[in-house]
Structure formats: C-alpha cells, structure tokens
Amino acid sequence: MTGRTVIRGGLVITASDEIHADVLIEDGRIAALAATGTPAAEAFTAERTIDATGKYVIPGGVDAHTHMELPFGGTFASDTFETGTRAAAWGGTTTIVDFAVQSVGHSLREGLDAWHAKAEGNCAIDYGFHMIVSDVNQETLKEMDLLVEEGVTSFKQFMAYPGVFYSDDGQILRAMQRSAENGGLIMMHAENGIAIDVLVEQALARGETDPRYHGEVRKALLEAEATHRAIKLAQVAGAPLYVVHVSAMEAVAELARARDEGLPVFGETCPQYLFLSTDNLAEPDFEGAKYVCSTPLRPREHQAKLWQGLRTNDLQVVSTDHCPFCFVGQKELGRGDFSKIPNGLPGVENRMDLLHQAVVDGHITRRRWIEIACATPARMFGMYPKKGTITPGADADVVIYDPHAEQVVSAETHHMNVDYSAYEGKRLTGRVETVLSRGVPVITAREYTGHAGHGVYTPRSTCQYLN
C-alpha cells in the first residue's frame, strides 16, 4: 500500500465546508482531518508530507460524462482510455464515468464487455460505466436489472440520431418503467432527432453546408420539446430522469418547472455551453467544425440562464461530454456537408480549471464549484462518499490546487490526444499542482507520475438523491 501521507496547511474545500486543515492519508484513504496548527494536526506523522500552504485542497473531480474511443460517424473519438484518463488527471479529475454502447441487434452485456476490454489496465484514474441502450426489447429490459445489481446503475437513451442510437417514445417509456422498478437512472439526450433530420435535409438542399448550420438546424425549441416530452414520459413511468448536456435556456425552464412540481428530474450542463457560443460555430475557413457537438452551442444569451440554473440548483452537475475528434482528418469529413462532421468536443482536461475561473468571475462560489464538479456527480451516480469529498473513509482522491497560478489554454500544452483546443488562448486563473488518486501521486508538482493500470473499475450504487 501507499503508506501515510500528510497534506499540510491548505484550505480544504468540499461542497459543504471550507476549513484550514491538515489531511492524513493512510492506505489509499482519508484517515483524518485536523485544524492546521492544533495538537491533533501536529500529531500526524507520515512518510510523505505535501506542503499546501496558500493552496486549496479539494476532492478529485468526478466527470460523469465521457466518451473515450467512441465510434461515431465512421470514425472513433481520438482519446483512448489511456490518453483520456491521463489528460483527466492533469486537469484534476480522478474519476470518470464513461458510456458503454449497446449496438442494435446486440445485448447490453456484449457492449459492456467490449468497454471493459478497452478500459481495463489502461486507465490512470478510476472509472465506471453507464450503459447506452440502443435496442429496447424484452431481453434488454431483463439485462437492465442484472446490470443495476452489478453496479452499472444508469442507462442512456437518445431522442436524437435516428438510425443510430435513437429510441422512440414507446421504447423510452418501457426503459423508464423498468428503471422505476430496478432503481436505475435514465439519462436522456433530449433533442427531437426526427424533426432535426428534416431540417438538416432542407438546409443541405438550400446549399447551407457550413458548420454554423449545425447549430441552426438543431433548434433550441427542439431541445426544449424533447426535454418536456422526456419529463412527461418519466412522470408516466414514475421514474427519475437525468437530462444530459443541457444547452438551451428553454430546456432549463422545462427542468425548473418539473423540479418546482417536485419531480425527481435532474439536469447536467457542460463547460462548452457556459463558455462558448454560436460565434465559435461561425468561425471562418471551416474552423467552426471544431465546435460541432450535440446539443449544439447556442447564442451567447443562453449562458446567463445556464449559470443561473447552476446557482438555483435547477442544473446540478457540470460534466464534459468529452468526445474529441481531430480537426485534421476527422472533423474534415464534414467539409461541404455539416451533417458529416463528427459530433464532439475535447474538454476532460479543462473542466475543473474553467469552473474555477467561474468562481473568480463571480458566477458560483468555491463550494458550489466542488458541489457541481465533484460531490453531486458522485451522489448522482452512487459513488459518494467514496468519491467526491474529503472525509475520513473516502478514497484519497485529492487535488492540491493553486488558485493564483495563471495559465493560457492551448493545444500546444494540453494532454488530450487531439490537435486543437476548444478554448485556445483563453487565460485562466488557477491551476492543478498535484493530484493523488487513492493516495498515489498521479501528478506531482506539475509532472506526470502516474501510470496506465493504476485506475480501477468502480461499481456504483443507485442514485443517492432517490433513497
């Protein structure tokens, strides 16, 4: 085991507390906290001491929405589990929950086994899986019960992408009814894919082929409509609902209304919707293709409503939907036809820093930063308090964070396996200095000291907001 480590002199920040405390780590877990300078803290002894004076000591980030090695549109996401989890560690994230994919005509088990094979022995940090359900039938429904029992407790469905991942309302209702019984959580990509396909076809027929039209055809109203429909189907099924990558203010309004009615409905947004906009999609010379993802980037005025939703808890989680495709050779597949641009952005390395910038900018508090990036995703997906907080008994997933360091985001210096940054040139205040995963230093004073295979698979309990 790792022996003992003590982190001295930092400001420990969790979702609920800020305290100047020393942290004792033993055998990969948090053993004790004591106020800095007190006899209890002075009594901590360890083989390794980390000086965190003037720094924050925060839980490792929990990114509950990543797509490593995802097949999409005839190509694959450019980050492997090895490169993607290493980049996550550089960005202060110590747990990811990735999406295993059921292909139509195949079982959930086949999809899950395939993703275990991709990840096992390759991850720098701990990982879990959600299950994408693409083919709802009697066998699939039975398998959902088995997966919940073994720690895959969330299932993603798509109202978008007809012919690929799409489920119709009847299939969605059946899966929701099943999750109402087995304790699983349905995650929904809420966009009206049938209507969007019509608008795509019409735009292309008019010669509107540039990346910016990707945002124009995937209308905010069709995100809001699908969000509303998903909420009503969940209500009929008596099931909870988690809506992924919420980007439009109209969709936030649907979630807020449902929550005001007391429904167990949850919403996630992503950094790209908080910091980027349709201005990026409209960048000339096909540069806009770098920003093609679904749900799409929205006009800038949506950002204020997303921040408001995070402050009022109508949105509870910020994940990345990290799904990188290189500009050269992958995004370029859509030159002359925006509908052929692989959908996805790189971001797993940037999330914690961008959200700290939001603290600096006054959008959220420090504790809310930790809540939306660490504690709530861990609770939402059944990993708390093992993950997402700093408390005795928790895994020692700890980040020493320098809130004063300045950095400029760039593809030149990032560690994601992709040839551009969605935030190129953005100046940020705050930077990860040292990262421990289960007590083992993965990043040490801005050097990578981790290795593939340290990260272990983490089975999950059911959503802790429903118990």
Image (cartoon, rainbow, N blue to C red):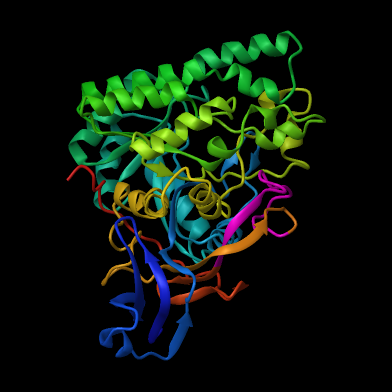
Number of marks in the image? 0
Q: Judge from the rendering whether residue 346 lies leftward or rightward of residue 136; answer left or right.
A: right
Camera sees residue 43: yes
In the rendered image, the residue lying farthest to the right is 285
Q: Judge from the rendering whether residue 162 lies leftward or rightward of residue 405; answer left or right.
A: left
Determine whether 410 is above or below 46 in the image: above
Q: Position of residue 44 (x, y in %)?
A: 32, 88
Residue at the spot x=45%, y=46% of the render? 100
Camera sees residue 246: no
Magenta span: 413-432
Q: Position of residue 394 (x, y in %)?
A: 30, 68
Q: Position of residue 86 (x, y in %)?
A: 57, 63
Q: Is residue 314 magenta?
A: no
Main SS category, magenta section: loop
Looking at the rendered image, the quarter that the N terminus falls into is bottom left
Residue at the spot x=38%, y=46% of the render? 109
Q: Is residue 421 magenta?
A: yes
Q: Judge from the rendering whether residue 364 lies leftward or rightward of residue 433; answer left or right.
A: left
Determine whether 113 is above or below 194 in the image: below
Closest to the observer: 259 or 285?
Answer: 259
Closest to the observer: 272 or 339?
Answer: 272
Determine whether 83 is above or below 172 in the image: below
